Amino acid sequence: MGDYTNMSAYYDVIMTSGYYDYDQIVTQLMQQADFRHVLEIGCGTGLIMEALAKRRPDVEIAGIDLTQAMLNIAQERLKGFPNVSLARENVTQMQLSHPYEVAFSYGGVWYFVFDGDKEPFMVSHIPDELGNLEGLARVAAHITPGGQLLLGIQGPHHDYQKPISNGMIYGQQIDPHPDGFIKHYYLDDGPHRVMAQTVQYRTYNFAQALTMLENVGLRFLNPSRTGHQFLAFVKSNP
Ligand SMILES: C[S@@+](CC[C@H](N)C(=O)[O-])C[C@H]1O[C@@H](n2cnc3c(N)ncnc32)[C@H](O)[C@@H]1O
């Protein structure tokens, strides 16, 4: 299951060394949807929530995550924002007090990979089929009718290593798996390996993903993804 405890202490320095552009993610989020109440699924250390809260103090921003060590960092980061709340939840059993106009996940529990002309596919941090079905149903139950689920778009994963801003070397290695792939993350400080984490990801082809989402009442909204950093799914009216 997608536990990020091992990586948590180094997550921010890895991600802010060029892995993600958080301001750009938030710009796209605000361009693609209108909301007063928004929920991030798999919010991690709260980097997206912070960038959003700075720009939208008028919006209620909630975040859930499975990994307590990630949430501890998010709690510290976001303590100055009264419009932000965090909860430790596994999305497969998520129970929140009210629904949201928009739920989104970027590199969180689910995302889509687009790789040139190849068929896009969906990646999930949840390794088992039932967990994915339950998780998507819980997400749909937390979106208001007419509201949206936005799932981030990423490029293909590949093996590499590179220096990050603190001088350490970040590396990742992808191994195939019958249900998707396994990704090994590591961080080296000179000869010392200071972090190693392995996550198993499940993948679904595009048609399978759209069917799973449709089955919980979430219909694909933006066939043209030009310039978009998220795919949008609209919650049908009951
Ligand atoms: C790559 S991080 C992304 C964090 C954040 N969205 C960002 O962009 O920095 C993925 C996060 O998803 C969380 N996660 C994985 N499986 C989960 C689940 N079943 N329920 C809730 N969170 C989950 C992990 O704990 C981790 O913090």
Image (spheres, grey):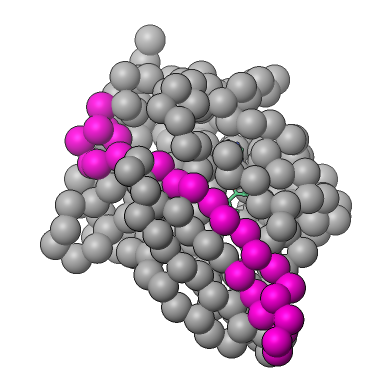
23 lies above or below 198: below
Question: Which residues are the magenta region?
Answer: 186-211
- Apparent side of residue 8 relative to residue 14 in the rendered image (left or right): right
46 lies above or below 160: above
Image quadrant occupied by the C terminus: top left
Residue 90, located in which quarter of the rendered image?
top right
Percent x, y of residue 212 = 32, 26
Residue 83, located in which quarter of the rendered image?
top right
Image quadrant occupied by the N terminus: top right
Query: Residue, x 65% and y 75% (percent of image)?
Result: 187
Q: Of helix, strand and loop, which mostly describes the magenta segment?
A: strand
| Residue 214 in view here | yes
Percent x, y of residue 10 = 72, 68
Residue 86, located in which quarter of the rendered image?
top right
- Apparent side of residue 103 relative to residue 188 in the rendered image (left or right): left
| Residue 50 in view here | no
174 lies above or below 130: below
Residue 204 drawn in magenta: yes
The residue closer to the viewer here, 212 or 31, is 212
Query: Residue, x 62% and y 59% (percent of image)?
Result: 197
- Apparent side of residue 69 relative to residue 226 in the rendered image (left or right): right
Query: Residue, x 19% and y 65% (percent of image)?
Result: 116
Question: In this figure, what is the number of numbered marks?
Answer: 0
Query: Residue, x 38% and y 70% (percent of image)?
Result: 158
**What is the residue that sits farthest to the left in this orientation?**
117
35 lies above or below 237: below
Residue 44 drawn in magenta: no
Percent x, y of residue 163 = 59, 87
Percent x, y of residue 207 = 20, 35
